[in-house]
Image (cartoon, helix red, strand yellow):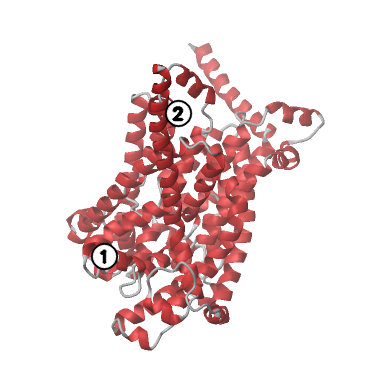
Amino acid sequence: MKTKKNSINISTGERIFTIFNYAFFVVLCLLVLYPFWHVLMVSFSSTDAALRGGLFLYPKGFNLDTYKSVFKSPDIFSGFFVTIVVTLVGTILGTLLTAMTAYPLSKKRLRGGKLFMFLVLFTMIFNAGMIPNYLLIKNLGLYDNIWALIFPLMVSAYNCIIMRSFFSAIPESLEESARIDGANDLIIFFQIIIPLSKATIATIALFTAVTYWNDYMSTVLYIQATDKWSLQAVLRNMLTNTQQAMQSAGVNVRAQTNTNAETIKAASIIVATVPILIVYPFVQKYFVKGVMIGGVKG
Amino acid sequence: MASEALRGKSKKSGYWVTLGKSIVQNKWLYLLLLPGAIFFLVFKYIPMTDLKIAFMNYNPFAPDKSTWVGFDQFVKLFTKPAFLKVLKNTLVISVLKMLIGFPLPIILALMMNEMKSLKFKKISQTLLYLPYFISWVIMAGIVMNLLDPSTGLLTGVLKVFTGKDMQVLTDTSSFVPMLVVSDVYKNMGWGTIIYMAALSSVDPQLYEAASIDGAKRFKQMLHITLPAIMPTIIITLILNCNNILNAGFDQIFMLYSALVYDVADIIDTYVYRMGIQKTDYSFTTAAGMFKSLVALILIYSVNFAAKKSGNDSIW
């Protein structure tokens, strides 16, 4: 009898904690999601409602006019074009290069491999800094060239480490049987190792793609011509132009001249976010996988 | 004596022979490595040679006319009040971010680990780390929308609590807290799943055994869950120390304005304005180099401390 009572006591305490725990995460998730929802709803709302502000659980005065004007902007299209090209080319080249670098480094028989690995790791903890990197791009003649958006971000030390620890876990015996059949390291890498590592390669490709998609600073530092601006740079320009106008002209002017500034900003945020939101549910499990591989010490 | 010298010599030439052999044997591996080696050489190590301009009075328009000045630029760094202020801002912002941003994911992961519904756990993880993948350009757009002085939702909420019309983005007293909150908002989910990933490798039998032994949930958390994520905690802490002078360039660059330079200007934003915009290359390269050196020293010493105390370290 006594023990039974005891166990009930424990379970009430635990039940309170469990309820609190679930409630806490429900609220936290809603808090994390609401800002995105808010901007989405503002983008569909009338300019009057947007100027009144407040809580937006649904669009107030639903209309698509804002999107019509956003999609008329040639800058958005050129931004999308540049970012898609840079992301595709950069991700393909970068992922291939990462795998090609990491594979030899996973082989213990490679002389100098340890030194090379140290040199790769060192770039993670010591960076030359903004000015030397800027001078490099200028000296290479890449200033105002779209390759300046691609080259510097192709390989990261972190991705190399993830790939290398994955390759290290592949049993040596797989290669040995291929070697007996006369295959060299190049054939083994492209025909055996790469097909085996699809999931990890997909993870690295996704990390790389997100880096390129979100990259803003490269444009600021290395690109001048507006037709070569990345999507993030175009978006930034749209978000701040009205802000600057507002600051220099006084707060109230906006209400009369640029009446739909709020909805335009919201819609351009949504337009730039939607591609990520569409792929996110499908690819997010790979990110978790990447974290787990990366968690294994390199 | 002579034979000894001879043996030493043959040993040496033997080394070169085996090295040559191993290079020939692994030529395809070296070939695979070559493009990556060129990448790291060109894009990571050649810029390091340009650190020399930190010791010069570099003239970007006529590099030949630059003069060597030794450590003058570094002396200037520490005698210039503007830089000292920027250094202080950097430290304040990154320490505040760390104070909240470091323990929070650990607490969230511990709480999440107590949830039994796998589906719920998965959905909340997925939702919580979504902001991590959104660029700071977009995040800043959202923050500016929510904090807009006239229409912003949070401006309204803050008015209810403080009774004042807060202009958070242009106010020196609230700008830094805003940086901390938005940074935590963006990164806490990612930090949490790193710990969750570490926890997924814990053997469930450990919990069963502990509960048979009468350990309650809190005790189980203290003695099973926490030790399981300890290595990850240490490594995250080490990497955080490496970042102490990176107070978040992208974030601050997107959100700050001249009105809040006093509290929000950090080394990176300062380097950008003085270097890229005003072409004071030597001084700003010195500032950047100081930053990288501090990071290097910090990570080495923290890593050393972690090793000494018997914890996991990053090498």
For label 1, the SS is helix
Q: Would you place residue A258 above or below residue B29 in this image?
A: below
Residue B263, percent from left and from top: 23, 60
Residue named by callout 1: B160
Q: Chain of mark 2?
A: B
Q: Which quadrant of the view contains residue B279?
A: bottom left
Q: Are marks 2 and 1 in contact (CB under 8 Å)?
A: no
Q: CA distance from mark 2 to mark 1?
A: 43 Å
Percent position of residue A282, x then y = 62, 52
Q: Which one is in front, B57 or A283?
A: A283
- As drawn, A80 above or below A32: below
Residue at point 71% right, 36% down?
A185
> Is disc 1 surrounded by few (<14), some (14 to 19) or many (20+) residues within 10 Å?
few
* x then y, percent, for residue B54: 32, 55
The residue that label 2 is drawn on is B228
Quadrant of the image occupied by residue B266: bottom left
User: Mark 2 is on which residue type?
Assistant: Ala
The circle on residue A296 is: none
- Horizontally, is A89 left or right of B215 in the view? right
Q: Nearer the viewer, residue B305 or B104?
A: B104
Q: Is residue A234 visible?
A: no
CA neighbours of label 2 inside 10 A, class few (<14), some (14 to 19), many (20+): some
Name the foreground residue: B136 vs A124: B136
Tell me: residue A226, above or below residue B209: below
